[in-house]
Image (tube, coloured by chain):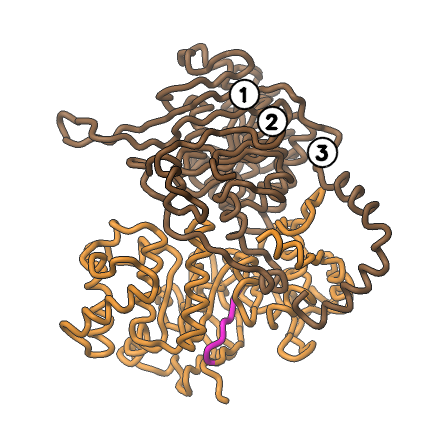
Amino acid sequence: MPKLLEIEGLKTQFYTSAGTVKAVDGITYDVNAGETVAIVGESGCGKSVGAMSILRLIPDPPGKIVEGSITFQGQDLLQLTEDEMRGIRGKDIGMVFQEPMTSLNPVLTIGRQLTETLEEHMGIVGETAHARSIELLGLVGISEPDRRLVQYPHHLSGGMRQRVMIAMALACEPKLIIADEPTTALDVTIQAQILELMKDLTRRLGVALIVITHNLGVVARYADRVNVMYAGKIIESGTAHDIYHTPRHPYTLALLKSVPRMDLPRQAKLDPVEGQPPDLTRLDDGCAFRPRCRFAVKKCAQKFPPLEKIKGPHIAACWEKEKVAKSARTIPTSKTKRMRKAS
Amino acid sequence: MSTARSKPAAKRKSAAKASSAAKRKAKASAARRPGAANQPKREPLVKVRNLKMHFPVTEGVFVPKVVAHVKAVDGVSFDIMKGETLGLVGESGCGKTTTGRCILQLEDVTEGEIIYDDVNLITLNKKSMRPLRQRIQVIFQDPYSSLNPRMKIGEIISEPMMVHNTEPDQEARDKRVAELLEVCGLNPKFSDRYPHEMSGGQRQRVGIARALSVKPEFIICDEAVSALDVSIQAQVINLLEDLRDEYNLTYLFIAHDLSVVRHLCHRVAVMYLGNMVELAECDELYDNPVHPYTQALLAAVPIPDPTVEGGRKHQIIKGEIPSPINPPSGCVFHPRCPIAVDACKKNVPEFREIRPGHWAACSEI
């Protein structure tokens, strides 16, 4: 089966007064139809820029996609004209952004924003568009949809706005939704509602999902595959089980160890990743993680390790994979039984 | 265990270590308590009694008329013991930050008492409050907006010492700044830098150094680690823990991240819509939550382990937080509560001690 989306060697750079920022530095990954792929990393690692590049939403200047190809359903998005691209954004690829207040238009009613998408892409107008809007709001679990349609974004709470965003993303029956930190601005109970909704809808409607997040818990809850990014590169990729149970990159391992876990006995001390994330204008040929890495050897400074296959889809970019593997055995595992009882 | 792969591992483990389970447990509980040498005393440092903070909602431009009140905090009582870290958790708008600001006397409290070391802070005027401010410090959430962009790091950290006149001598102040930067894991050279030259984690360390500069005994951490990336968050959490043990600090740790609170706190209080719904020792609260809101909150936190997540049943709480202008009658949680009965709509549940040290406000438990 052909892949829904294939990204190859994508490089996006920003030209600033401080120098060239290599925000995305050659990433390659693919997404199958109906699959949920998570992109994890810290702020500034290029995870959002990578996703915005798929939609060609990089402000130019200062940004530019310098290299690579993005093949979506057989066509290279980077070769399309702006008009053709507009036909894909919001139709075949839907978007859900982090901040639901700033990504909805404050001077248009919810109904207008939904019908606008339908008019533009599907040619659905009037009564039919109205009916479809009500259906969509119902789908994302908004009560009294007909009353909501005439309301403005400021009438709604954060969770409701995010539901509207999801309804808009789903409006034209897309094949792929890109969700950039969809629940970061929300409270935990609302986050749980939205996550469950997205999981349920993508499974039911067969929509593929790229979810960008820094929350490892969110990823564990609903990703099929995970890409871990650091300093503009994918440094490890695999199924959720690969990444969480047998990480082969020291950064992944360090991330997993640095979060306190609610399902395990309390530790005396957390095990943080020491140091600061690197300056993206001053990257050299070596591995960008090496100043913070406890496995670093001489070779790390000379050459960036290639992404090597470990098992199945699991790949990692590290010279010292074996040592990491040994250390990964110390990742605490939980007694599933106890959690079941607790929840 | 849901996967075939982890089964044998579990079996092996249980076979080998079943006999030593009790020993392990005892060891774990001894190791799990951070700063075990520094147990909190049973003597309250801060006593909050029936605290109410209602903000007026006004209409009209020239002659504003009060039309309603936002009941941000509506009758909250608790103690903070000496040397204790009390976690205050809840969702946005539950009044946890307002509670902290009331203790700091940054708000004009509507009703209630805040007794700090036998002094009722509410009765004090600004001038008599000032010496106490030296003893109560705060670390804010946003390390970008809580540091003055026009001041150098050194000036930011020495300002409280000048205000309280703890180090009148310039040279002694500079020395103390260098010392504080070092304590907080920063290079003393940073005192000549401006905040924009630093990353979020470094700025938060500056915020911590500033709070420590006047040698306080009580620090309110208002979402002190929420804005930081996970790897940096762990560094700052460790720093806060080290400082607590070294300087005998008492923290009120306001946060919404339940796993961080569990890691850091001795006791935890849960707030909902201006009311306190549950308060207990940390382990007791996380292991045996009694209030349906606490249970829902804990169940909603995703756990970074796909095996655990796969085996978890997600009982998701419905609805959203009602407006604090017009909170629901009776128990404020009843519209979202899975176990609510008719009486909950009328009767306000009493905040009572269910087990020794475990308080909750629910009539159905």
The residue at which mark 1 appears reads as B46
Picture residue at 80% right of the left edge, 59% below the top: B14
| Cβ–Cβ under 8 Å for marks 2 and 1 | yes
Q: Is residue A253 left or right of residue A223?
A: right
Q: Is residue A256 left or right of residue B279?
A: right
Q: Colour of chain B?
A: brown
- Closest to the observer, A35 or B317: B317
The residue at which mark 3 appears reads as B35
Q: Is residue B68 visible?
A: yes
Task: State the image coordinates of residue A3 (x, y, percent, origin top left).
Answer: 48, 84
Give the spatial CA distance, label 1 vs label 3: 21 Å
The residue segment tinted magenta is A33-39
Dot 2 surroundings within 10 Å: few (below 14), some, or many (20 or more)?
many
Q: Amino acid at mark 2?
A: Thr
Picture residue at 42% right of the left edge, 87% below the top: A74
**Is residue B5 depicted above or below B342 in this figure?**
below
Chain coloured orange here: A
Task: State the image coordinates of residue A164 (x, y, percent, origin top left).
Answer: 31, 61
